[in-house]
Amino acid sequence: MNKAIIPRILAIEARRSRFGYALFEGPNRLLDWGASAVPADLTGRAAKDAARKRIALALRRCNPVAAVVRRPRRVKTGRGATPGPILRTISREAAALPIPVHFLSRGEVREAFQLFRGRTKEEIAEALVGIFPELVTRLPPKRKEWQPEYRGMIVFDAVAVGFAYWQRNEMQFPPPE
């Protein structure tokens, strides 16, 4: 029996001091998800080393054919406000394995959810729960305008990046017969 290999991708959503991840096996199967943060008491070289170790572990443990990352928008405020160091670490660690890294823009991720009428992060998270019911327990409560973003939203952002990647590239990896 010739069994087709279904490719795995690791979708990553990077922030300044943390990242969320989602491991997909094909477009319809979410295997794992979660988030990792660099401890707040670490700075400089120690913080970069901690981020590198966590990202390298995720890439080795998941063994994906590709890593998919949402390209951050350019931020012109405050020093250190961008996820640049984490993105560079992802690129370096993936290249060492060697795993290709694909970047999606914010617009490409939103475009993948037009069919589901997902315009806001909350609407996209609700659409993702409809697609992947295993995420229902992680769905954050509705946020009021004055409230900060729920920390667990980073996982939904990572799942959204992976889902958008599969929407864009599904023809490249046809389902097994």
Image: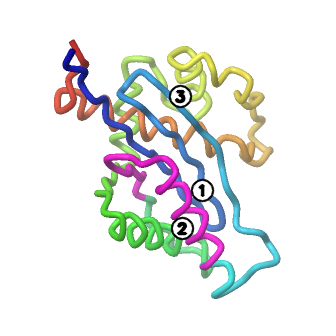
Q: Residue at x 49, y 30 (%)?
A: 119
- What is the tally of numbered marks visible in this picture? 3
Q: Are marks 1 and 3 in contact (CB under 8 Å)?
A: no
Question: Which residue is labeled 1 in the image?
Answer: 19
Q: Which residue is mark 2?
A: 83
Q: In the structure shown, which secondary structural element does the residue marked by tag 2 occupy?
A: loop
The part of the image, by quadrant, that contains residue 115 is: top left
| Residues rendered magenta in the picture | 49-71
Residue 173: image quadrant is: top left
Q: Give the mark, 1 or 3, whose residue is nearer the N terminus.
A: 1
Residue 65, magenta (yes or no): yes
Residue at screen point 76% across, 79% down: 42
Q: Which circle, 1 or 2, is nearer the viewer?
A: 1
Quarter of the image for the C terminus: give it: top left
Amino acid type of the residue tagged 3 in the rendering:
Ile
- Residue 169 at x, y percent in the picture: 23, 34
Relative height, residue 74 to residue 165 (above, below): below
Front-most of 81 and 41?
41
Crowdedness near tag 3: few (<14), some (14–19) or many (≥20) residues, C-alpha within 10 Å: many
Q: Name the element at disc 3.
A: helix
Looking at the picture, tell me which residue is in the foreground, 173 or 141. Answer: 173
Q: Are marks 1 and 2 in contact (CB under 8 Å)?
A: yes
